[in-house]
Image (tube, rainbow, N blue to C red):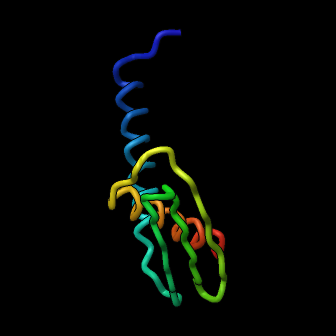
Amino acid sequence: MKTTQWEREEARRKELERLKEEEKERETKLEKKLEVSYVYDPEKKTLECDVIYNGLKDGFCAMYDEYLTCKTVHELVSGFVQYLQEQQQ
């Protein structure tokens, strides 16, 4: 079955709306206490992160084959905090 240009544009519009909604959810304001500490060791190529979010303590330790950029470290830590936020919702 062949899709028309209108159907493709409609699907693209719906996908953009979905992505905007996801972005909005990620921008949730912090309404709970948050403590974050992390250590990136380029010699060991490890990243350790400890987080307390609204009393929930969690963390991770990861090893990498290559050196990380500062941006990558912040994205990993931010993603983990978002994960904890979602767990409490």
In the rendered image, the vertical position of residue 77 relative to residue 53, given as above or below: above
In the rendered image, the vertical position of residue 39 relative to residue 14, given as above or below: below
Q: Is residue 8 left or right of residue 58?
A: left
In the rendered image, the vertical position of residue 51 relative to residue 4, given as above or below: below
Question: What x and y, as percent, mark residue 34?
Answer: 51, 85
Residue lying farthest to the top in this orientation: 1
Question: What x and y, as percent, mark residue 52?
Answer: 59, 83
In the rendered image, the vertical position of residue 24 relative to residue 31, given as above or below: above
Question: What x and y, as percent, mark residue 36?
Answer: 49, 80
Q: Nearer the viewer, residue 68 or 1?
A: 68
Q: Quadrant of the C terminus?
A: bottom right
Kindly identify the residue that appears in the image at 42 percent across and 79 percent down: 29
Q: Quadrant of residue 49?
A: bottom right
Kindly identify the residue that appears in the image at 48 percent across and 74 percent down: 38
Q: What number of labels is visible?
A: 0
Residue lying farthest to the front in this orientation: 43
Question: What x and y, as percent, mark residue 45?
Answer: 49, 55
Q: Is residue 34 left or right of residue 13?
A: right
Kindly identify the residue that appears in the image at 40 percent across and 69 percent down: 27
Kindly identify the residue that appears in the image at 65 percent across and 75 percent down: 58
Q: Quadrant of residue 75?
A: bottom left
Q: Is residue 62 left or right of residue 8?
A: right
